[in-house]
Image (cartoon, helix red, strand yellow):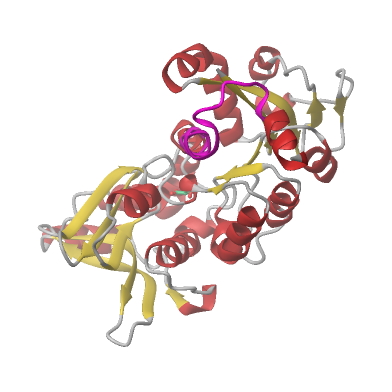
């Protein structure tokens, strides 16, 4: 049975939820998936860093209130996040990057991912910034170092959108994608239809854990813009930059607008789309659209998301599921770890795997 030693970068909602899954279901994972998971390092902007190469005891960390967690004073702990040192020097198999998304230059997550790949460590991330802004470069870097760069959770949290397109739709041509890809804005639009004002609906979305730390990206469409870039680049081979994806959010829609639409048999939805033009280039946009009730995306409500793939051989294939939430996004990280296991180590029975990798590299 193999074992993966994890370094968790960022210990906010998502990586904490992954730690909870490991603590609660580790034995089940071992039985079902054929590997065990051990956390050997955690770094966090507020809590600092904690390293124990024999495996961190997660229970006391998970028992503490998130806002009160501090690693200073613990054995192997420091008030300083020491991200670069932890990522490069602590022997881990997989670096799990779940810090905040920076849509402008992807930092500091982009550097975290580069350091990990350059150190010969697999990376899985839910962070849209590095994937949308530097996905091709990072995949090249991973290939050069013989490791994986996995990012299923960057689009629709744990709902397997990217792997569906890459693994299950082979042999046909995807001509376009269209989706509801932001749970917060979709939830808010539903609340507006019920007559709730925008600020109240935003607060509720934050309390439910759907919204980004700064909900502006959810409301103004920038979160969807990054997801459209990722989908278009991964699925349509587009190579889009942010400025190639026009972007309008939902802040201009009032409860009255939402209710007027309902009375006409329409529903406002924030739709992200990308489609191949006849000349082969890709056109992409994010905008609110009043969809007729019969449209496949009109019935997608609350934090649920959906992506419709337009294909030549199957027509439209729609995948729907959660698009946000701590545990749902943490599941995406587990699915990335499973993908790494299947790709690199499914036949190994030696632990720990970073030693296998190091020995392989030494030749
Ligand atoms: N805040 C996002 C949403 C989740 O509401 O869909 C992460 O992308």
Find residue 134 and report its horizontal and vertical position in percent.
Answer: 61, 64
Majority secondary structure of magenta residues? helix
Report the residue at 63% width, 48% height from top. 146
Does the magenta run of residues contain 178? Answer: no
Name the foreground residue: 250 vs 200. Answer: 250
Report the residue at 50% width, 16% height from top. 30
Visible in this render: residue 45?
Answer: no
Find residue 331 and report its horizontal and vertical position in percent.
Answer: 46, 33
Q: Is residue 213 above or below residue 12?
A: below
- Residue 187 is left or right of residue 313, and the answer is right
Name the foreground residue: 253 vs 170. Answer: 170
Q: Quadrant of the C terminus?
A: top right
Which contiguous range is marked in magenta? 334-353
Find residue 257 and report its horizontal and vertical position in percent.
Answer: 26, 64
- Residue 27 is left or right of residue 78, and the answer is left
Q: Is residue 137 above or below residue 126?
A: below
Q: Is residue 286 above or below residue 69?
A: below
Report the residue at 56% width, 35% height from top. 14
Q: Quadrant of the N terminus?
A: top right
- In the picture as drawn, the residue positioned furthest to the bottom comes out as 279
- In the picture as drawn, the residue positioned furthest to the front comes out as 363
- Residue 347 is left or right of residue 58, and the answer is left
Find residue 345 and report its horizontal and vertical position in percent.
Answer: 54, 32
Visible in this render: residue 77?
Answer: yes
Examine the image and state in which quarter residue 269 appears: bottom left
């Amino acid at each position: 049975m193999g074992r993966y030693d994890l370094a968790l970068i960022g210990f906010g909602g998502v990586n904490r939820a992954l730690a909870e899954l490991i603590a609660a279901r580790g034995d089940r994972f071992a039985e079902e998936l054929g590997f065990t998971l051990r956390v050997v390092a955690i770094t966090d902007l507020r809590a600092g860093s904690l390293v124990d190469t024999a495996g961190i005891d997660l229970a006391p960390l998970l028992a503490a209130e998130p806002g009160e967690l501090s690693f200073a004073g613990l054995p192997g702990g420091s008030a300083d996040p020491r991200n670069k040192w932890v990522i490069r020097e602590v022997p881990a198999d997989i670096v799990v990057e779940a810090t905040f998304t920076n849509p402008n230059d992807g930092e500091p997550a982009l550097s975290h991912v580069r350091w990990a790949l350059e150190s010969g460590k697999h990376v899985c991330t839910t962070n849209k910034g590095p994937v949308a802004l530097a996905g091709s470069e990072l995949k090249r870097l991973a290939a050069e170092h013989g490791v994986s760069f996995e990012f299923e959770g960057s689009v629709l949290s744990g709902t397997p959108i990217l792997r569906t397109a890459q693994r299950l739709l082979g042999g046909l041509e995807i001509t376009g994608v269209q989706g509801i890809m932001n749970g917060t804005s979709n939830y808010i639009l539903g609340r507006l239809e019920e007559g709730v004002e925008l600020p109240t609906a935003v607060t509720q979305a934050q309390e439910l854990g759907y919204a980004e730390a700064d909900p502006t990206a959810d409301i103004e469409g920038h979160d969807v813009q990054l997801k459209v870039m990722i989908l278009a680049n991964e699925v349509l081979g587009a190579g889009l930059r942010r400025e190639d994806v026009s972007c309008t959010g939902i802040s201009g829609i009032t409860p009255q607008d939402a209710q007027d639409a309902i009375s006409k048999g329409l529903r406002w939805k924030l739709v992200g789309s990308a489609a191949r033009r006849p000349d082969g280039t890709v056109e992409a946009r994010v905008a609110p659209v009043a969809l007729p009730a019969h449209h496949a995306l009109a019935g997608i409500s609350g934090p649920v998301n959906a992506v419709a793939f337009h294909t030549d051989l199957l027509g439209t294939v729609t995948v729907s599921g959660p698009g946000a939430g701590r545990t749902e996004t943490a599941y995406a990280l587990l699915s990335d770890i499973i993908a790494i296991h299947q790709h690199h180590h499914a036949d190994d029975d030696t632990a720990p795997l970073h030693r296998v990798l190091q020995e392989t590299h030494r030749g």
